[in-house]
Structures are given as structure tokens and as C-alpha cells.
Amino acid sequence: MIKIAILLNLWTIFVQDVRHRAVHWFLFPSLTVFFMFLNLKRYSSFSETWQPVLFNIGFLMLQLLLVSIYFSAKQSRWINITAGLLGWGDILFLCSIAFYLSFVNFLFFFIISLLCVLAGWAGWQAVSQNKGKQIPLAGLQALLFMLFIAADWWIKPVNLSKDDWWFHLIN
């Protein structure tokens, strides 16, 4: 039942972001709670649950800081990246999935989703009559995450809350 609620939540984020370039804020805390519940069922100890979350949030904070510093240096003044460059929904979505993914899987999804969204959005803008400046990042990442998480739930060797499957894939 929780898995269906997660998929519906992700689908709602996708639809709202693509249609309105805005997402209701309560979708992100509910998604976080669903992910926390699934992880508490998977892990046996408190530290196993929170260590990847802290690493993921730390990585995300470092990325946001570096992007802020980059744009601030470029403009020669402090730039708030949430004022026009990156929406709060985008940040909250990444914080939500940080509660489910292991660190390596978070890095993988972060990089792959940004590349896929950028390539897909550039392709869409090339053929679309309706040119838009804002990318529905959280919505498109939510759609990609639906596929990503479906692999976790229905393909047995994949476990996104642990990094073991990567090491088996590499070997």
C-alpha cells in the first residue's frame, strides 16, 4: 500500500510541476515519511537508517553551496539560487529521495537524472512551439524516479537502499 502511495505521490509531483511549474509543498514531507517508513522496515539499526540520509543531505547541501558560490562569483555579488535559478520544489524533492537511497545510488540518480532532464528538455524545446525558460526539474526527476524505484521493487538484484548491487554489477 505504501508503494502505491509513493508512486501516486511521485506522479502528482510530475503532473503539477509540468502543468503549473509549482508543486504543493505537502507532497514532499509525505513522500519523506513514506520513504522513512520503508527504510525503517528494511534496516535493523538506527545508524543504518540515518547514515546514508546524512551523507545524501550533506552532498546536496555541498552542491547547493557550490552552485551558489559559482553564480555569486560570476555576478560579483551574493546570489540566492532559489530566487529564479532553482525552485524550492526541486530542492525538497532531492531531500525527500535522500531518505530512501543509499549514497552511491543517490549520486547515480542525481547525475543521471540531471543529464536526462537536460537532454530531454533541450530536445523538447527544439521541437516545441511553446518555448519555456523554466525546466520542471522536480517533476521530470519524479517521473524518472518512478522508473528507478520500480526497478528496486520488482527487479530482485537491485536494492536502492544499499550499494551491494553496484559492486556485484561491476564484478
Image (cartoon, rainbow, N blue to C red):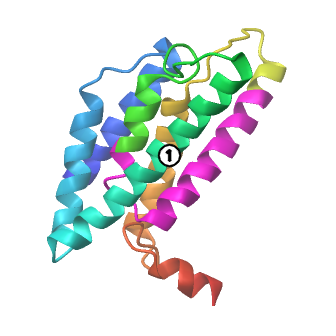
For badge 1, the amino acid type reads: Leu
118 in relation to 37, above or below: above
Position of 122 with respect to 77 (left or right) is right
Q: Indicate the secondary structure of the residue bearing disc 1.
A: helix
Density class for disc 1 (Cα within 10 Å; few <14, some 14-19, many ≥20) is few
Nearest the viewer among 50 and 70 is 70
Nearest the viewer among 51 and 168 is 51
Look at 57% across and 29% down and name the residue there.
68
Look at 50% across and 66% down and name the residue there.
104
Which residue is labeled 1 in the image? 62
73 in relation to 155, above or below: above
Rendering coords of residue 38 (x, y %): 22, 60
107 in relation to 137, above or below: below
Look at 54% across and 43% down and name the residue there.
63
Image quadrant in which you'd find residue 170 = bottom right
- Indicate whether residue 119 is drawn in magenta: yes
Look at 59% across and 20% down and name the residue there.
85
In the displayed image of the protein, which residue is found farthest to the bottom? 171
Rendering coords of residue 127 (x, y %): 82, 21
Magenta-drawn segment = 96-123
Rendering coords of residue 8 (x, y %): 32, 38
- Indicate whether residue 101 is drawn in magenta: yes
112 in relation to 44, above or below: above
